[in-house]
Amino acid sequence: MVPETSFCSFRLGDFLFGVQAGRVQEVLRGLPITPVPLAPPGVMGLLNLRGQVVNVLDLKKRLGLKETPAGQEPFCVILKDRDQWLGLLVDEIGDVLEPSPDSFEEAPANLNGEARKLIRGAYKLRKRLLLVLDLDKALDFGV
């Protein structure tokens, strides 16, 4: 199954990920995040976005990637998930990409653990892969 073909891209560690452009509301940086005691792993806390409470999630923890180095402030991608807003911390924002549908391949069989569950497939770009997140699964942190 070939997913949508317009993606907002971002970097987590050395990997380029994409999410459906229609689900992204905005990108922020520098807003204070309030930690939540006893929250599930990967739930960084809450932020107040113009009066709306937004859960902020860190996929790096869930995917087992190295944490963002101290002093490097992440971006927060605000997504609409069903009837709530969620923030996803990322290292760097990329472009909106529209790869050719014929460059799509299913998720590689050698992916393990959480990555296998969260990645729908990949688009072959000129010099790298665009890993397509299954947002419904990726945002399910139990919040």
Image: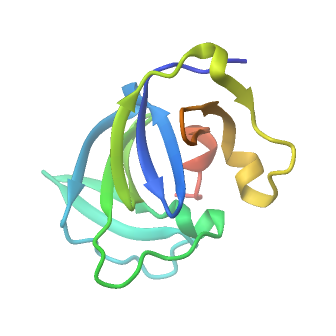
Looking at the image, residue 25 sits to the left or right of residue 65; the answer is left
Image spot of residue 58 (x, y percent): 48, 64
Image spot of residue 9 (x, y percent): 42, 40
Up the image or down, 106 lies above or below 33; here it is above
Nearest the viewer among 51 and 74 is 74
Looking at the image, residue 140 sits to the left or right of residue 88; the answer is right
The answer to which quarter of the image holds residue 31 is bottom left
Number of labels in the image equals 0
Residue located at (36% from left, 78% from top): 35
Residue located at (61% from left, 30% from top): 123
Which color scheme is applied? rainbow
Looking at the image, residue 117 sits to the left or right of residue 9; the answer is right
Residue located at (42% from left, 71% from top): 44
Seen as rendered, the residue at the extreme left is 50
Task: Name the quadrant of the N terminus.
Answer: top right
Seen as rendered, the residue at the extreme right is 109
Up the image or down, 116 lies above or below 69; here it is above
Image spot of residue 127 (x, y percent): 54, 40
Seen as rendered, the residue at the extreme front is 127
Image spot of residue 55 (x, y percent): 38, 58
Nearest the viewer among 98 and 52 is 98
The answer to which quarter of the image holds residue 23 is top left
Residue located at (80% from left, 41% from top): 108
